[in-house]
Amino acid sequence: MRPPSEPSPAPAHDAAGDVVRWAVFSCLLVPAVLVAHGTSVGSAALWALGLACVTTACRILLRRSERTPAHVGEGAHRRGR
């Protein structure tokens, strides 16, 4: 009789990638809504540029936090004083 096979491990979920995808979607959606509600195209383009800058900065920070191991400082959270 064969031993029961173990299920294959699920691929790691890319939470940071999901956040970035939603942010990019928002960078496209917000200017379209602004133009639809009467904002000038130039103003909507500036909003899109600002959102793209914020999205890029957040993506860099998220990727950096994924690569950097968490450090426990010597503050109030330290046990065994």
Image (cartoon, rainbow, N blue to C red):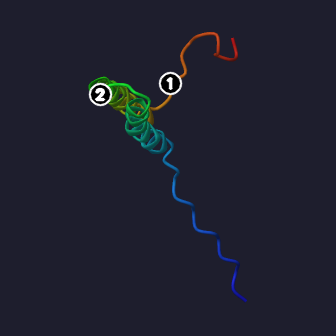
Q: Which residue is mark 2?
A: 49
Contact, CB < 8 Å: mark 1 with mark 2?
Answer: no
State the SS at label 1: loop
Q: Is residue 11 above or below residue 4?
A: above
> What residue appears at the point 31 percent right and 23 percent down from the top-left corner?
43
Question: Identity of the amino acid at label 1?
Answer: His
> In terms of secondary structure, where does tag 2 sit?
helix
Relative to residue 73, is residue 55 depicted above or below?
Answer: below
Quarter of the C terminus within the rendering: top right
Indicate left or right for 43 with 72 as reference.
left
Indicate which disc residue 28 carries. none
Mark 1 or 2, closer to the camera: 2
- Quadrant in the picture for residue 46: top left
3 or 54: nearer the eye?
54
Residue 58 on image: x %, y %:
40, 29
* Residue tagged 1: 71
Going 37% across and 28% down the picture, which residue do you hit? 51
Q: CA distance from mark 1 to mark 2?
A: 35 Å
**Residue 73, percent across and down?**
54, 16
Q: Is residue 10 something one can see in this rendering?
A: yes
